[in-house]
Image: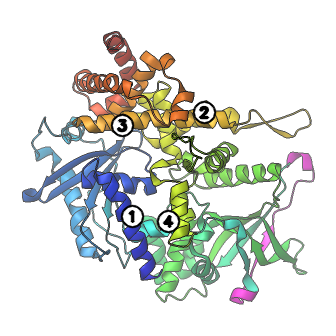
């Protein structure tokens, strides 16, 4: 990465952030901007809890009750820094220890009813065994040059993990060219190496295996894998649902330790689960020494769909000078033999998603990643690139919404264009404020449709429910001829109505922000939007919202009254419960409708 490229990205990032800071605090705006890249499964609650005399800091948190995971966020943000400066491992460890100290000392911290951290303190104090994993995430606009893991210890009963999201990590995400199908690797010509795999026999009864694929198993040289990653980098793992950009955690530490130890190198293939990969086609030579042994000369569209962290860790060891010439990685290769036809692309999408899902059953996988390539998501992406927003002043349309099917897609598109006129024209056609990702779309949809408790659970829960609601647009059924058929086709009108729901949600968010309500802002927005539809949905025309790209100002006072009542209800009805956890329950929504609907019906 050239230094000037990072500087250019940093300037754009800070300029975008400056617009967000105008409507909220700098730290909260910084958190929201980073979350767009991270696609967090839950929505962190911004608390800005800072006790310098105790060396304690927590800027945001979320709690996953089903996983018993506590996520603490630390923000290191300098809004006056003209260019990104380096942050050291020592500084990062100090920041991580501030969050760790909060967790180890929470029993002795005074409960402050006026502070939003009180909810978390109450939750933790109610049950000492509530947390099985503590995740500390540091967000910084500096860059971490060494990228070494931040290792801190905790009690044996609670696992701890520290992640660092620096400005360089964001840049890596958006700068990766996402057109992985263009990769053509000729192993012999490029690296003077190849590898051999055994072909798994196909069933003699082809009706039992309707998919057009070949599967090969065996091993690949760790050095060859590292050299391929050295050249192609993130392109090789774009369809891997795991985060691979920073080698961290016990798994990757174990990989590094094994590769460093000359006495254990030969055991790497025993300890490690290896990689699973797919390709669209390949040049393979049948070996005369075995009926099903093949030499892999070249592969087109090669993608590692499971084992991205293994690959990145091996590459890291290779870069540090560790001899990998006698280290091997077990591998499974599936050649999908796909073409550009719709049915072939469907088969590829389904196959890759299932390989990723089943190969990763030991890990928590985001459904939004697995379903990003469905025809429904592709249709939404297509409509967002082709449907113009109606002009409001009788001139020709100039802008469109930009739906991000994959994380960082907007910045990838932007950076493919030359700086200056080309990028200016792109931003005019696709303004940054009209950028929409799939989990936000899901949360906006679910809140309007009367499921604010689902939206309160976070992006992944909302996305799962959203896809279930709209399953007819992406699932298939087999007809009498055993051919896959679409159940229902997505239309441009449906796309516009989805965007209308987003516009309404954003209007509610804007008004809630202007009210300066303290605490539970995300929950207030979801519940207020849901109640607005419950009470006045028949009087709000979604088509009109799309045409005007706004909700009429005549609803402003109504929304503010609903929002104020919502906050009061959430606080009062929770009782001794954690308010945020209470808002995730269907009983909370049902009680809200029962207790408040009649009171709010007459505010117009």
Magenta segment, which residues? 189-209
Residue 265 location in percent, x, y?
53, 81
Residue 217 location in percent, x, y?
74, 67
For marks 2 and 3 on the same chain, the one whose residue lies earlier in the sequence: 2
Residue at numbered disc 2: 468
Number of the front mark, 2 or 3: 3
For marks 1 and 2 on the same chain, the one whose residue lies earlier in the sequence: 1
Q: What's the distance in space between the residues labelled 1 and 3, CA to CA?
A: 22 Å
Circle 1 crowding by C-alpha within 10 Å: few under 14, some 14–19, many from 20: some
Local secondary structure at mark 2:
helix
Q: What's the distance in space between the residues labelled 2 and 4, CA to CA?
A: 29 Å
Residue at numbered disc 1: 13
Which one is in front, 369 or 10?
10
Number of the front mark, 1 or 2: 1
Number of the front mark, 2 or 4: 4
Mark 2 in CB contact with mark 4 (< 8 angstroms): no
Residue at numbered disc 4: 173
């Amino acid at each position: 990465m050239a230094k000037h490229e990072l500087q250019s990205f940093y300037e754009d990032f800070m300029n975008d952030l400056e617009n967000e800071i105008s409507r909220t605090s700098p730290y909260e705006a910084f958190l929201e901007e980073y979350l767009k890249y991270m696609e967090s499964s839950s929505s962190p609650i911004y608390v800005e809890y800072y006790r310098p005399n105790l060396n304690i800091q927590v800027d945001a948190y979320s709690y996953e009750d089903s996983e018993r995971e506590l996520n603490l966020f630390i923000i290191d943000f300098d809004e006056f820094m003209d260019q990104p400066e380096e942050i050291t491992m020592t500084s990062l460890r100090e920041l991580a220890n501030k969050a760790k100290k909060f967790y180890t000392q929470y029993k002795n911290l005074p409960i402050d009813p006026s502070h939003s951290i009180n909810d978390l303190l109450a939750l933790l104090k109610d049950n000492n065994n509530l947390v099985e994993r503590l995740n500390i995430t540091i967000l910084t606009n500096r860059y971490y040059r060494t990228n070494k893991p931040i290792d801190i210890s905790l009690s044996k009963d609670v696992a701890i993990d520290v992640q660092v999201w620096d400005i360089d990590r964001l840049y890596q995400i958006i700068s990766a060219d996402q057109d992985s199908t263009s990769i053509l690797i000729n192993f012999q010509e490029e690296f003077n190496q190849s590898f051999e795999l055994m072909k798994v026999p196909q069933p003699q009864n082809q009706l039992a295996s309707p998919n057009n694929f070949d599967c090969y198993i065996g091993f690949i040289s760790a050095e060859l894998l590292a050299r391929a990653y050295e050249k192609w980098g993130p392109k090789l793992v774009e369809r891997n649902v795991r985060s691979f950009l920073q080698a961290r955690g016990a798994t990757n530490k174990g990989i590094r330790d094994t590769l460093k130890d000359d006495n254990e190198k030969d055991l790497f293939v025993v300890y490690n689960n290896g990689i699973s990969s797919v390709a669209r086609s390949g040049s393979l030579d049948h070996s005369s020494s075995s009926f099903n042994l093949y030499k892999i000369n070249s592969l087109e569209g090669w993608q590692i769909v499971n084992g991205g962290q293994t690959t990145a860790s091996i590459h890291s060891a290779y870069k540090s000078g560790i001899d990998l010439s006698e280290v091997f990685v077990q591998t499974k290769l599936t050649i999908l033999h796909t073409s550009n036809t719709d049915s072939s692309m469907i088969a590829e999408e389904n196959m890759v998603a299932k390989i990723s899902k089943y190969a990763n059953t030991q890990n928590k996988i985001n459904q939004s990643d697995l379903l990003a390539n469905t025809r429904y998501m592709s249709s939404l992406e297509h409509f967002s690139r082709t449907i113009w927003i109606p002009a409001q002043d009788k001139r020709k349309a100039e802008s469109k919404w930009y739906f991000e099917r994959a994380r960082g897609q907007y910045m990838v598109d932007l950076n493919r264009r030359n700086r200056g006129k080309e990028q200016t024209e792109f931003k005019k056609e696709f303004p940054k404020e009209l950028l929409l990702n799939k989990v936000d779309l899901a949360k906006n949809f679910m809140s309007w449709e009367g499921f604010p408790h689902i939206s309160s659970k976070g992006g992944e829960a909302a996305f799962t429910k959203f896809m279930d609601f709209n399953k007819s647009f992406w699932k298939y059924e087999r007809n009498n001829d055993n051919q896959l058929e679409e159940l229902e086709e997505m239309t441009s009108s449906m796309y516009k109505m989805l965007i209308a729901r987003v516009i309404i949600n954003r209007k509610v968010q804007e008004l809630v922000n202007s009210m300066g309500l303290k605490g539970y802002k995300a929950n207030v927005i979801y519940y207020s939007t849901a109640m607005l539809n419950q009470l006045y949905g028949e009087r709000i025309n979604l088509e009109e919202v799309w045409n005007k790209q706004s909700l009429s100002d005549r609803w402003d006072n109504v929304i503010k009254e609903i929002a104020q009542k919502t906050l009061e209800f959430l606080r009062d009805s929770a009782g001794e419960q954690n308010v945020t956890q209470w808002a995730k329950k269907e009983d909370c929504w049902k009680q809200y409708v029962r207790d408040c609907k009649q009171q709010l019906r007459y505010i117009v």
